[in-house]
Amino acid sequence: MNIKLLIIGILLSVTALFGQVNKAIEMPYVEYPIEAGDHDEVVQQYCLTCHSFGYVLNQGKKSRPYWTGTVAKMVNEFKASISKEDQQVIINYLVKHYGFESTSGH
Amino acid sequence: MDKFSRRNFLGAGLILGASTLFAKEAVKPIVAETKEFVPPMIAFPEKKPLKTISDRPPLLESSSDIFTKEITPNDEFFVRWHMPDIPTYIDLSTFRLEVKGSVANALSLSLDDLKSKFEPVEITSVLQCGGNSRKFYAGAGPATHGVQWGHGAMGCAVWKGVRLKDILNMAGVNATAKYVGVNGLEKPAMDETPHFFREMGIDEALTDELIVAYAMNGEDIPYLNGFPLKLIIPGHFSDSWVKMLSEITVMDEYRKTFFMDVAYTVPDNDCECVVSGSDFEYKRKPIARMNVKSVIGYPASNSVIKKGSRVKVSGVAFDQGKGIREVMISLDGGKRWSATELQKDYGKYAYRLWSFSWEPKIKGEYTIMVRAINRIGNIQPLPNEIGWNAGGYQYNAVDSVNVKIV
């Protein structure tokens, strides 16, 4: 995997910045590496609405039942509006790039 | 070791009993190919570079060397939000903490009101994410759900603020009140997504120790740790330590919510773990009180140390507020154990620093392990004994580091 981290935005130096700031803080934007192909654009469209790709990368490789359950959680609990068809596209993508085939287990 | 075994036999037996059952009946762990992603180190506002698990919502993990200090510096303190929409500016002239619901007088308090109209109180307490250390569950069973935190989703700080009880008493809680709900200013990306809303029983809310804090280690609370107000619940995991606290709602009825009833829950049994089958078949209970735990701050894992060096092995230990009785250390992978020296006591909810002087005389590979016992005899389980839960919550097995003496 050719990981190239592109960190965009000004990374604020840690000079005397206290909570009580008189202007807005500037949050760094991190572009996490995302494997291309297999409709990654669908994955990005839905998943990145609520959270960074770091949530995917930092879970380790997970099974098909795991990713199926996770996508179901996003739809049922967090109310992500994803068609059945697109849910399957996302699950297949996650299993292929960030998981493994298995019918049972976590 | 003899004394250690006898004294804690009962407590350890309880844990062992539960975990043995698990080991026998649980599904075989699936060992997957793990190409572990290494999160970048990035400095967020008011923070030193921290391991950036996610930037949105921000999840920032501290490195293990913070466990050589009893107080975690604000700029190295971990960060964990639930929602992507966090205000980037708070105007204190308009910011108010609303106290409402089943009360005689609803309140709308400014930060100045809190600082001037209430008695200030201070408490030193550990703040630990419920999923802290969850990646170590993968060593004993199937990897758990959620992002794989190391030990760095915890810290200890001196919190200053006002008692939640005093605020509730000023509002005048109705006799019918049974619960208190709390939430802050973070918001989901879509309206339909459940908001981060936490609840507790009215009795718990009225105890002396819960604090609405406005200061952390003598400074304003860092923005990413919840400026300007954060709820402090000493001895409890951090799920209800709401950041940017903006609303306190006194309620006659419990409100069912995702973040109370689904997230941050474990099986409602004695071991709070999966004995057989799937975690989700169990009745749930929210995680609450922290269990006894110790971690090694120095040396770091895979350190290379010269033979004859004087090594001050050190780290921190804590529990839910019963107090640490003893921290044992093993330099041979758990065969023999010795006592470490406990350092100054900063209070029952604080980190207790421990240290051990070691002068390794023989070259080779060593596994250093530490194991804490609290004053009621709770002892940390070994990694292969810990009861497993799918959420990866409450991990507190014995910590270890490998070092090489050359």
Image: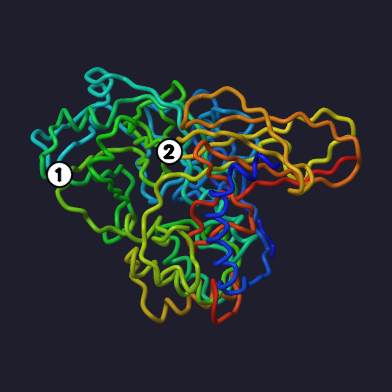
Q: Relative to the observer, which residue lies in front, B112 or A22?
A: B112
Q: Earlier in the sequence, mark 1 or mark 2?
A: 1
Task: Indicate the position of residue B38 as horizontal and vertical percent values.
Answer: 65, 53
Query: CB atoms at circles 1 and 2 under 8 Å apart?
Result: no
Q: Is residue B160 above or below residue B325?
A: above
The residue sitting at 53% across, 42% down in the picture is B377
The residue sitting at 69% across, 65% down in the picture is A1
Residue B1 in sight from this viewpoint: yes
Query: Mark 1 = which residue?
Result: B177
The residue sitting at 54% across, 71% down in the picture is A106
User: Which quadrant: the C terminus of chain B?
Assistant: top right
Q: Are marks 1 and 2 on the same chain?
A: yes
Q: In the rendered structure, find residue B235 and report the number of the disc placed on it.
A: 2
Task: Name the chain under label 2.
Answer: B
Residue A35 in sight from this viewpoint: no
Q: Relative to the observer, which residue lies in front, B156 or B82?
A: B156
Give the amino acid at mark 2.
Gly
Task: Name the chain under label 1.
Answer: B
